[in-house]
Image (tube, grey):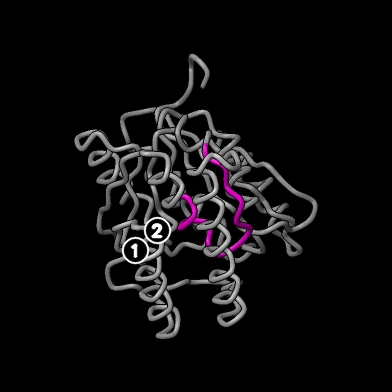
Amino acid sequence: MTEHAPYLSVASPCFNEEESITAVVEEWDAFLSKVPYESEVVICNDGSRDGTASVLAELQRRFPRLRVVSFERNGGYGRALSAAIGATRGRHVVTIDSDGQFDLSDCATMLDQLEKGHYDCVTGYRMGKKDSLFRVLADRGLNLLVRVVFGVQLRDTNCALKVATGDVLRGLPIEARGYPTPTEICVRLVARGYRVGEVGISHRERARGASKLHPFRTAWSMFRFLVYLRMKLALAAANIISES
């Protein structure tokens, strides 16, 4: 973190969001323009195949606090989020999706909780989740599984909206490439002894564009990744391997 680092960084992955990203960045910038501290937005364009790259280039000209990192080929949500986080400079980092389903202004309450509660990370839990019945039930099943397998007592580990101490989050390895990424962040933070709190947040329907998730493929991938992560953390705890 540099001497003139902003107080808050927003990190977000972006893939094929040509239809929605302008409205999302405009909303984020309007909120950040009102807060009494310096901020930045870092978006990783993860090899988008539509017009997202050109839209982001135009948005950079309009909004000085926006920086864009890019991959030529799509590598998955986790790689893109990790790249965005790695490019941040802020004392605190907010992770958020770029599809408009989360309200960045909720991070104000989360930041307050982070500092008053002396947490290393505060994750949101979605109140009245605006999604398909399948995905709502799948998230409930996931959170039960995470509580049983990892002992992480949180309501909504896979919520994308999180606020964390910048150096803590930038130092966290992220191996997942897709849907499990937000849960991996929570699990690894707890495994490393960091304090993680929770705050209820709003959740909105996607206004434009389409979800990139394929339900059954995603569920199977999530299960396999959690088994892998559990085994890896157990081996690291036994000093058989190093956690990285």
* Tag 2 secondary structure: helix
User: Most extreme residue toward the top, as rendered?
Assistant: 3
Q: Main secondary structure of the magenta part?
A: loop
Residue at 43% x, 52% y is: 187
Which residue is label 1 attached to? 147
Q: Tag 1: Cα neighbours inside 10 Å, few (<14), some, or many (≥20)?
A: some
What's the residue type where badge 1 is placed? Arg
In the image, residue 241 lies at what x, y percent?
60, 42
Q: Residue drawn 66% across and 59% down?
A: 76
Residue 38: within the magenta? no
Look at the picture and state if 67 lies above or below 205.
above
Reply above or below: 153 against 218. above
Residue that badge 2 annotates: 150
Residue 40, how many percent across, how many down?
49, 35
Q: Are marks 2 and 1 in contact (CB under 8 Å)?
A: yes
What is the three-letter code of the residue carrying label 2? Phe
In magenta segment, residue 176: yes
Q: Quadrant of residue 195?
A: top left
Q: Residue at x 39, y 34 (%)?
A: 165
Q: Quadrant of the C terminus?
A: top right
| In the foreground, 157 or 241 | 241
